[in-house]
Amino acid sequence: MSAAGPSLGRVDDLARLAIHEASHIAVSSAFGDWAPGPAVATRDRGCYEPVPPRVQAEPFDADLLPLVAWPADLRRFLEADVCISLAGQIGEGLFTGTPTGRVEGSVVETAREIAELPPPSTEDHAWAARKVADDLSLSDVERVARSARIAFVGDPESRMVWLRFLELQTTRLLVANEAKVRHIGKVLANAGVLSAEAVKRLLDGHAVLKVAG
């Protein structure tokens, strides 16, 4: 899940993108079976890559079989992927409506927490550099559109109802996990790059409201 913003070089942009990625992190964690991955936030680009669950299903014709009749694990995976992709922009709207240009909380306390987290490895930094420079990776909007096309062939009315439903569900998850989003966003904005293990520790530090099932 990636986000790009204007290269204005302001703290506001960094804080906004950090909240964007933290929203992806919180919502992916809420589904329970998506493992934490690394995260990066710079002043003009961010990315978070959770590890999706393995889903196996017998082959079927998705063009003919409506979504409600899909294998349950596959449908859950698709809807989770859409919610995670939607989370970044929704989180920005919820939690960065009035940018202040500064990160709330003690600088010393934030620095202490970052120092206690597992530092990003050489591989993490290399991944972050690739993601920041990659203009060809799918955006959140493109991921959602791809999933919607797969789920509903020739049924634009159902497609829109489904997307609105998932948008509302994602909003509810983010509101319920606001403290987690804000905290991870603050840490990411200051650290720049977080390893998967660091993301896991931050998630373990707060209870995350999870999706049943």
Image (spheres, rainbow, N blue to C red):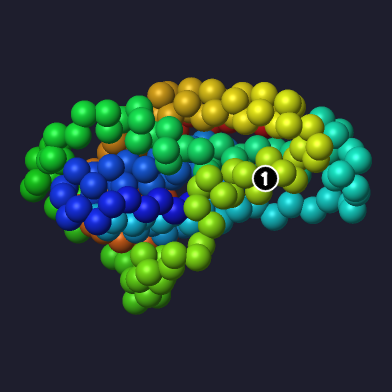
| Vertical position of residue 25 compared to residue 100: above or below | below
Nearer the observer, 8 or 48: 8
The residue carrying mark 1 is 147
Q: Position of residue 66 (x, y in %)?
A: 85, 34
Is residue 118 visible in the rendered structure shown here? no
Dividing the picture into quadrants, the one containing residue 184 is top left
Horizontal arrangement in the rendering, residue 210 relative to residue 104 (left or right)? right
Dividing the picture into quadrants, the one containing residue 116 is bottom left
- Residue at image coords 87%, 44%: 63
Q: Position of residue 193 (x, y in %)?
A: 30, 61
Horizontal arrangement in the rendering, residue 102 relative to residue 146 (left or right)? left
- Residue at image coords 44%, 65%: 135
- Residue at image coords 39%, 34%: 91
Is residue 186 visible in the rendered structure shown here? yes
| Vertical position of residue 164 compared to residue 84: above or below | above
Q: Position of residue 120 (x, y in %)?
A: 32, 67
- Residue at image coords 28%, 38%: 183
The C terminus sits in image quarter: top right
Nearer the observer, 147 or 153: 153
Horizontal arrangement in the rendering, residue 19 relative to residue 104 (left or right)? right
Q: Where is residue 154 in the image (x, y as percent from the top left)?
A: 81, 37
Number of marks in picture = 1
| Vertical position of residue 99 compared to residue 37: above or below | above
Type of amino acid under label 1: Ser
Which element carries disc 1, helix, strand or loop? helix
Mark 1 burial class by Cα count in 10 Å: few <14, some 14-19, many 20+: some
